[in-house]
Amino acid sequence: MIEAINDCFHTELARDDSVLVMGEDVGRSGGVFRATAGLQERFGVDRCVDTPLAEAGMLGAAVGLCMAGWRPICEMQYDAFAYPCLDQLITHVGRYHWRTGGGMEFPLVVRMPYGGGVRAPELHDDSPEAYYVHTPGIKVAIPSTPADAKGLLAAAIREVKEKIGLCEVCFNLTDETRCRICQDPRRDEALICVVEEPSDVIPMERTHEYHGVYHVLGGALSPIDGIDPEDLKIAELFVRVADPGSAVDVREVVLATNPTTTGEATALHIAEELRARAPAVKVTRLASGLPVGSDLEYADEVTLGKAFAGRRAV
């Protein structure tokens, strides 16, 4: 069983650079059962992370890693050690996909040995699976053979990445051909809000001031970093707005890129191109109130709502 789990870890970390393992003694010691043996030597300390003896902190850090695009695997030494992190598991991991309206996935795997047979003291041989089975948003897998262990663990690690793709219209994250916002008939398709990343859609939705659709660029222009217009979804935006054959007559484009140097440069480039390609379309920028040099996803909904309501022509 342990050999199968260890082999799965080595395979998945080699297959996907966004996968990492974190837990107590998983690195130098290779785990108390040696399930993570050899990972730190092969993949380095950044992808096999020894954490403090703090399960709540471990899972809380994993939540942040998921939001930043990583795919963490949390190794709990024993099942009952996970009780301190029930809050993170129930209120964040299990609910954030719903809380963000499907805009954010949580590709997080928690692996723990459970049950009797190890002749360990208390807190080492509980059977808490019923708690997790009854938690919305959480899937539970209990293998009975080495083949099951390797197959189920690999499936859990890969599931979200293989299921999630980009919306064919706005390039937001979705598990369907079109995201839920683009499918919503109540949204104003003639009003397009341009953002840098899928995570920027979430704070805009929280304002309850915006009822149009989105266009996600996938980043911002940065010649220093080698990011040119061809590397972003800028050409696709021009097709949506300026193509005579477009099914929607776009009325306004709101440039909601981050108020950073690269965000401002991206907004200026798009505004100039739209003025030349679609002079009848109104192009606006979020109003002042957002701090210069910050990212949109960190703005509170009141400030962002007022910035949107007071947007200015570009």
Image (cartoon, rainbow, N blue to C red):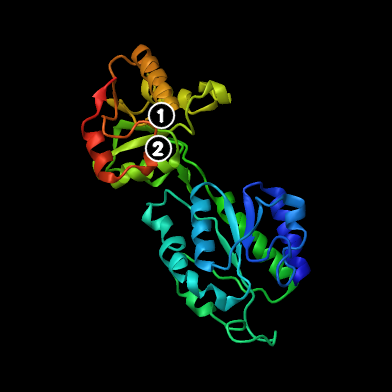
- Relative image position of residue 169 (x, y in whole percent): 43, 35
Marks 1 and 2 in Cβ contact (< 8 Å) = yes
Quarter assignment of residue 145: bottom right
Figure quadrant of the C terminus? top left
- Relative image position of residue 93 (x, y in whole percent): 47, 61
Which residue was labeled with disc 2?
A: 295
Q: 17 or 154: which is nearer to us?
A: 17
Which residue was labeled with disc 1?
A: 260
Q: Earlier in the sequence, mark 1 or mark 2?
A: 1
- Relative image position of residue 159 (x, y in whole percent): 59, 56
Q: 80 or 148: which is nearer to us?
A: 80
Amino acid type at circle 1 is Thr
Figure quadrant of the N terminus? bottom right
Asked whether residue 274 appears in the rendered view, the answer is: yes
- Relative image position of residue 170 (x, y in whole percent): 42, 35
Position of 55 with respect to 117 (left or right) is left
List the single residue furthest toward the top.
Answer: 276
- What element does badge 1 sit on? loop
Q: Is residue 281 positioned above or below 306 on the image?
A: above
Q: Residue at x 45, y 75 (%)?
A: 134
Q: How many marks?
A: 2
For residue 161, the mark is: none
Tell me if mark 2 has few (under 14), some (14-19) or many (20+) residues whose alpha carbon lies within 10 angstroms of its own: some
